[in-house]
Amino acid sequence: EARSLPMELSEKRGVQNNGFVQNEAFEDEDMDTSSQEEMPKTCSVDVDLVAVEETVLKPYAGMPKEVLLQFSSQARYRVTREILFWLVIAGSIALVCATITIIALSPKCLDWWQASPIYQIYPRSFKDSNMDGNGDLKGIQEKLDHITYLNIKTIWITSFFKSPLKDLGYGAEDFYDIDPIFGSMRDFENLIAAIHDKGLKVIMDLIPNHTSDKHRWFQLSRNRTGKYTDYYIWQNCTQAAGSVIPPNNWVSVFGNSSWQFDEVRKQCYFHQFGKEQPDLNFRNPAVQQEIHDIIKFWLGKGVDGFSFGAVKFLLEATHLRDEPPVNKSQNGVIITAYSQLYHDYTTTQVGLHDIIRSFRHTMNEFSREPGRYRFMGSDDDEKEDIAATMMYYGTTFIQEADFPFNFNLINMKNLSGYSIFEAVDSWMKNMPAGKWPNWAVGSPNVARISTRIGKEYINVMNMLLLTLPGTPVTYYGEEIGMENIASENVSEEHVNSGPVGATLPEKSPMQWDGKVNAGFTEGNSSWLPVNSDYQSVNVEIQSTWSNSTLSLYRALTLLRNEELPMNRGWMCHIWNDSNVFVYVRELDGLDRAFMMVLNFGQESTIDLKAIAPNLPSEAVIRLSTHFSNAGKVVNTKLIKTEVGEGLVLEYKTAKPVHTMEAFHGKCFVAEKACYSKPLNLLYVNC
């Protein structure tokens, strides 16, 4: 029993790990000897304490913290670790610097309104969804795939506000509502959602200059109700011999006096257009605020931009002096035609651009979200006064419109290589530096290309439109070469749906297929007759022909989207005469260039090598209005074109035309960029 007790105590005390911890000395050296005698006899082991201290410790599983810390303080691969550390730091710094450099040198990406052509839709004539013979918003939604099929990403829908339609919808009765003929606000919201789901953008018309005489504001104004009393321009008129004598000789765009006597208010109101379209008084701050509220309402609905129309008419001179006649001998004679006066007091008055800039400011409030820039265009045709048109761009520091719509190619009085050159050169030379051009060859207010200049030129005009620098605007139907309907097919009922001056033959229903009513409506009739050529000129049949106007249009939009020189490169005028217009598109750093040889006259043969000696002797036809010629090689010393033929030639060069001294002053570029072949990226400082 005496021997078993120490063993039990020993077991209770546990076993010490003496491999890493030195033996502890007994604290009580004066232990009672009698007690020692009772202890069991043990074996003595001689331990060299110095050797134990020098024993190399090795890590083992389950090490306590104290042991682990001994190993953490022992350096391992110090040099390697330092090298790796500084390499990571240097690499990170280099990556940040490279990123900053690339961002600093990279050109601004083209915005959505620059990158894609704009497709203009007259909604009443595009597609009827409810068989009433009128195109509507649901019809547009049904045909969105056609827009994407054309490689286009921006739609411009002309006016669809609630309106008496006396002026084809341009005199709004309610700026906050959809005309029932086009559908409902829910239809509009669904259309916007569908457009954005397809990655498209939508622009809408807004004409702030006037309203319909049915508008609530006008009804309140003619009764002198509160703040609405001065929402319109009212003046006293004198009456003599039962007729009204207006305050001055001002004439409306549609002819005759621009003053109309109102029996309710017993005063004359001013109208720049039809008498059913009274002009708003933009010298009244409350009126300006109303327009700002309208802009906010539609932007809040998801609209991506506006085309502001008739803005040059927003202000009139307050002194009401007679405007000077073009023919001075007509002084004192009653003038009834708009063209007989110089409109010094009724257009482009001081303060006009302040109002337009305020519209821009309101739109910018909705452009702060990334990717949601709101486009602003001004739809005013100054015709002969190109400087007045360019003012709508704003200045370097104060922005107005992203661009005023360009009607130079529409306003040409005759077609030739000279007139095309003058139309292009006039815009490019007068456009402020850093601004973006645009082009249009059709609109709801002029005859279609095929009717205006001839069927044989429709393809070459589309080729011009889609290869010039800037944003092209296509009026619906031009992609298939639609023509005006014959005037005799427009009945008196149709004419009465619009005011004097409103044009209808170019607004005929879109020709979708060869079925009854060209697939525009499944109803018995359409609001305007369909053109009689619809069985051969329609989307369905042309999509199956490789040499159709539609196929060429699609090939051109694809070329524009895919080739850098086409969407942001240089444009240099090479040559023009009465028959042809020739220009190149190039990009700095890219050895591939494109030359357009477009015939707007008679059959022609030109030697381009003599005009630009550094041009290569051969070029490949990338696209042609005659599809069978695509891929052929042509000699630049002898380029033949037939009437209305267009060629897009592709070639390689080490010396671009825009670097040649002989062509200085003939080259233009917007959103300049240069291409780096080794890095496969664009940069600006070249």
Image (spheres, rainbow, N blue to C red):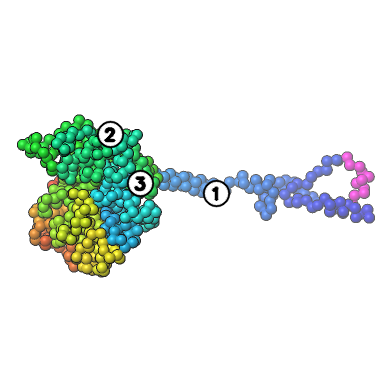
Q: Position of residue 589 (x, y in %)?
A: 26, 51
N-terminal of the two: label 1 or label 3? 1
Element class at badge 2: loop
Q: Residues within 10 Å of mark 3 (few under 14, many from 20)?
A: some
Horizontal side of residue 618 vs 307, given as left or right: left
Q: Position of residue 84 (x, y in %)?
A: 49, 48
Q: Nearer the viewer, residue 65 or 606?
A: 606
- Range covered by the magenta-colored residues: 30-41
| Label 1 vs label 3, nearer the camera | 3
Given the image, on which type of amino acid does mark 1 rest?
Tyr
Which residue position is annotated with label 3?
176
**Name of the residue lying farthest toward the top:** 319
Given the image, on which type of amino acid does mark 2 rest?
Arg
Q: Nearer the viewer, residue 10 or 404?
A: 404
Q: Position of residue 452 (x, y in %)?
A: 14, 56
Element class at badge 3: strand
Judge whether residue 36 is colored magenta.
Answer: yes
Q: Is residue 150 above or below residue 242?
A: below
N-terminal of the two: label 3 or label 2? 3
Q: Which mark is residue 77?
A: 1
Q: Which mark is residue 283?
A: 2
Q: Residues within 10 Å of mark 2 (few under 14, many from 20)?
A: some
**Residue 326 falls in which quadrant of the image?**
top left
Report the residue at 33% width, 42% height from top: 216
